[in-house]
Image (tube, rainbow, N blue to C red):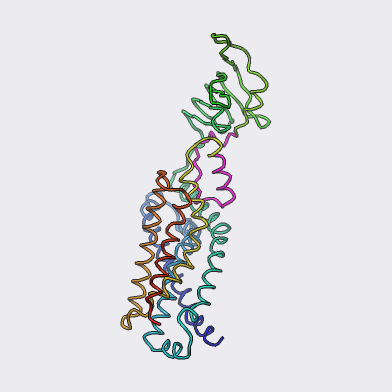
Amino acid sequence: MKIIEYLFRKVIPLFFGALIFFAMVLVLVDLMMNLWNFISNGVSGLKVLRIMALYVPKCFWYATPIAILFAVSYTLSDLYANNELIAIFASGISLTRFTFPLLIFAFGMSFALFFFDDKIVVPTYAKKTAEQEEVLNKDKTLNNDKIVILSENGNICYKADFYDDGAKRLSSLYIIIRKEDKSLDSIIRADSASWHDEKWLLSGGIQYTQKDGSIKAGSVSQEILDRLTEPPETFQNNVISVETVDSATAKVYIEHLQKAGLPFAEPMSLYYKKYSFPFILFIVVFLSVGLSGKTRKNVMLMSLASCISAAVLFYVTQMITMLLAKFGAISPFMGAWFPVFMFVVIATVVLRYART
């Protein structure tokens, strides 16, 4: 227990110090990227500070894997350089056994990082984005035009010239109704449609149905009117970013895309990423155990270089797999989880050849 306590007394202060340092670097980078826009729009200093403060949780989320990788890598390399691990190995304790508490700690922190993202990072980052767009005059209207929406797995297709979000009204609306075998059932033309009592009420609606080789026009049947329940949010000029909503909201949004027959590969891969990314904490600790002890000189510099290199390699790999998932080359699940699996294998191989 004394050895474990000694190990954590070295790792924890380094971890929090590195976490604050890397997080502040990310905050400053974001500030520098937007500073000229803030100045040109006359944004007050207090408002800028508030926006940056809302960005801090996101920066901590990004910086946590790099910080724990640096802390563990530097600690173990320093113990190697000072010959302290030789005494531990001589007492019959292997490197794996010595570092096992760190692996358990990192595994538990992976779950904590997921909940931190879901409950704190997501709402604060959404507020940061909204307030930044507001002060930079980038507000987006929810009105939409030239809309085509699929519903009921493609059995209903809405086509409207314009959607007025304030009035919850669709203008110049066409609705195509298809049978289960996807053959045409009928076409509805309406001057407009208003949202009322959880369904669309048509104004000037006419239903065209093919019967006996001719087209029949008549009033819209009640059966079809009862099926026009696609919510107004679907028609808004507002594409949800899965990264800016919690996991429950993201799941509902993806289910809507699947129901409407719209592309969902990219949002689905981002949804899986919410679960896969936190486990990078376990991976980097695993990896740092294997990377430690490679040199006795310039321990600080080598530890910093190794953790940055590993982080860049992971993020680049994840970026590539997420792009492949977006374009359908691989499944959304593999787009999010393949880098995790790959780095587990790399960490295992590196640990196999680590100095013990």
Query: Where the C terminus falls, by quadrant?
Result: bottom left
Residue at horizontal 53 percent and vertical 27 percent from the top: 157
Return the x and y of residue 142 as percentages of the image width and height. 51, 37
**Which secondary structure type mostly characterizes the magenta part of the structure?**
helix
Which range of residues does the magenta coloring cover?
231-256
Return the x and y of residue 316 as percentages of the image width and height. 36, 57
**Depth order, front residue of 74/38:** 74
Image side of residue 329 versus residue 275, left or right: left
**Depth order, front residue of 29/245:** 245
Query: Where the N terminus falls, by quadrant?
Result: bottom right
Q: Is residue 136 above or below residue 226?
A: below
**Depth order, front residue of 143/308:** 308
Confirm whether the magenta stretch covers residue 40: no
Residue at horizontal 55 percent and vertical 43 percent from the top: 253
Confirm whether the magenta stretch covers residue 253: yes
Q: Residue furthest left?
A: 297
**Depth order, front residue of 30/22:** 22
Return the x and y of residue 101 as percentages of the image width and height. 53, 77
Q: Is residue 190 visible?
A: no
Return the x and y of residue 66 as percentages of the image width and height. 42, 68
Q: Is residue 305 above or below residue 201?
A: below
Residue 303 quadrant: bottom left
